[in-house]
Image (tube, helix red, strand yellow):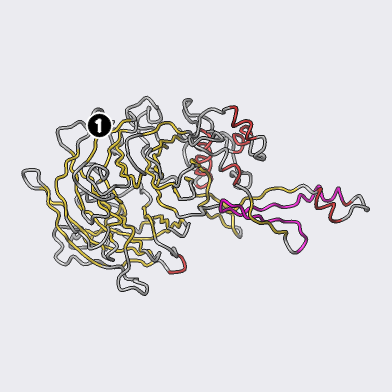
Amino acid sequence: MGFVDARFSPDHANRIVGHGYGGSLHFWTQDCSSQEEEKKDDDMMEEDALVSARWVANPCVTGHFRSVEDLAWDPEGEYLLTTSSDQTTRLWSEVSCVVNGKKVCRWMEVGRPQVHGYDMTSIACIGRKSNHAQSDDPTAEKEPQHRFVSGADEKVLRVFDAPASTLRLLHTLKKLRDPATPTSSSATPAEWRVERAFLPSLGLSNKATVEIDVRESNKFAGPTIPDEDLGDAIDPRAEVSMEDLKLPMERDLGATMLWPETRKLFGHDSEVVCLDSYLASSGSDAPLVASSCKAKNDVASAAIRLWNVKLGKCVGILKGGHRSTVSTLSFSRDGKYLASSGKDRRICIWKKSDHLSAEYNDSCEYQLTTAMDSAHKRIVWSVHFCPGKPNILVSGSRDGFVKLWRIVEGDDGSLDMKEMLKFEPLCKGNKKSEPVTAVSFADFISRSDDGIEYGLLSIGTECGRVEVWKVPISENDPNFDAKLVFSVPANECHFDSVKKIAWRPVGCNGDEVLSPTILTFATCGEDCGVRIFMLQVSRKV
């Protein structure tokens, strides 16, 4: 996207730093070998030597340069996807490196699946690893692993599949972090996956095959990592050390690390606002995606659409719940409930009809079973179901309060929402109340000696602060009191509104695990930043 500025190093002018418009810092170092050859000519002026010198690109610092609107973890927790108003979707993974003689892991951008022409608004992962042999088969009933859906300031949802080059790179990074990692399908991607995607000069859809206009535009776009070199750098059959690993540069991220677009989902009448997905933990159930768009203060435009991405069709339209834009959606872990809320301050609980097939082949009917009018005094920015307790819901609002709700189901199938707890974040800045913009439950439950269960809840606020609270989720807790577990220091928080919080999926949540556990969660905000935190907790209160 071009450079804004560049500077030579002040000492020997043998390094250059450049600032790219796309929010990246670029570094080049003068090739010493070529410099020695030039010194043989005593008559060569210093200025001529700099002009004729060979400069080698070094790894650069990358990141979003506009508000980061949404993020989503890979269902296996292998990588993080973020989407932003800078019209890109970026892939982050842990990269092993050596600092002061010690091996450490740092999160770095290793892919840029989508470079779009509209501001991005939302993202959801829909591919899950399966124990079946056909887990990476595009013709299987379930979605293959490494697939996501994104929404932008347009009426279309777009579906993307990971290319083979990205999967090999992710497998190599995993092997460097843990040499005992067994060879998986990521190391030898299925034959149906393309090697890389290509973006036409005047198009918005990443193509799986190169076109003439792409080849012509690449002549003038500068050099990138050739396909064969990229393949050699991340060949899973070769033993690659941390020193030999070649990560994609800024130019390569936007050109050679794109994911092919496999499908478009049409149906919304205005720009997409938010997404959420339900992934069945077992069986052959297809993933279900819920989406909302900007409403025009009427029931029809405030409808929620349900999608079977595998079939590429809308399998349900949920009407009658809202009259204003739905700003947040959340499926329960078992897919039985869908919670929605937004500008009308109403929280709706949609229940899946029991008599319908879980495969969502022809239709998927969720019925509005209960709703809480004026659940908060101001707009509700975020709702989220507790993974370990599908009937526990949390909501965060601009009124500065976090509320915990219990969904009670009657014998006749009717639902009722009961408010369990109401509290404010500890940090309020200089305001009387600090708007809560993001809430998220961890897939983690701790228990006290008397059997009381507690959930771990992260909260993000408009001023950028992030807090982690312990909240009771048992029916037999007489106190119902929330306790602050951890407050992220101000210098490590966002300095503008937190847009989304998501906990990294964990592999084991069994009751037998009582030792301290390391949990990871990611946050994104309007300050253009993505932050990843690690928290040590114990299952025993």
In the rendered image, the vertical position of residue 127 relative to residue 499, given as above or below? above
Identify residue type, mark 1. Answer: Tyr
Please report the bounds of the magenta region as a residue range.
11-38
Q: Quick one: which residue is furthest to the right in this view? A: 43
Quarter of the picture containing the C terminus is: bottom left
| Front-most of residues 257 and 389 | 257
Query: Residue 43: x and y, percent?
Result: 93, 53
Q: Quick one: which residue is furthest to the left in this view? A: 412
The residue drawn where x is 16% and y is 37% is 353
Query: Residue 94: x and y, percent?
Result: 50, 49
Q: In the figure, residue 305 lies in which quadrant?
A: top left
Queried whether the magenta region covers residue 26, the answer comes back as: yes
Q: What is the count of numbered marks?
A: 1
Residue located beneath label 1 in the image: 360
Query: Residue 497: x and y, percent?
Result: 40, 61
| Front-most of residues 303 and 259 | 303
Queried whether the magenta region covers residue 90, the answer comes back as: no
The residue drawn where x is 49% and y is 54% is 66
Q: In the figure, residue 520 lies in which quadrant?
A: bottom left
**Neighbourhood count class around disc 1 (C-alpha, 10 Å): few under 14, some 14–19, many 20 upward:** many
Is 391 on the left or on the right of 308, as rendered?
left
Q: In the figure, residue 521 lies in which quadrant?
A: bottom left
Query: Residue 435: x and y, percent?
Result: 32, 65
In the rendered image, the vertical position of residue 478 relative to residue 21, given as above or below? below
The secondary structure type at the circle numbered 1 is loop
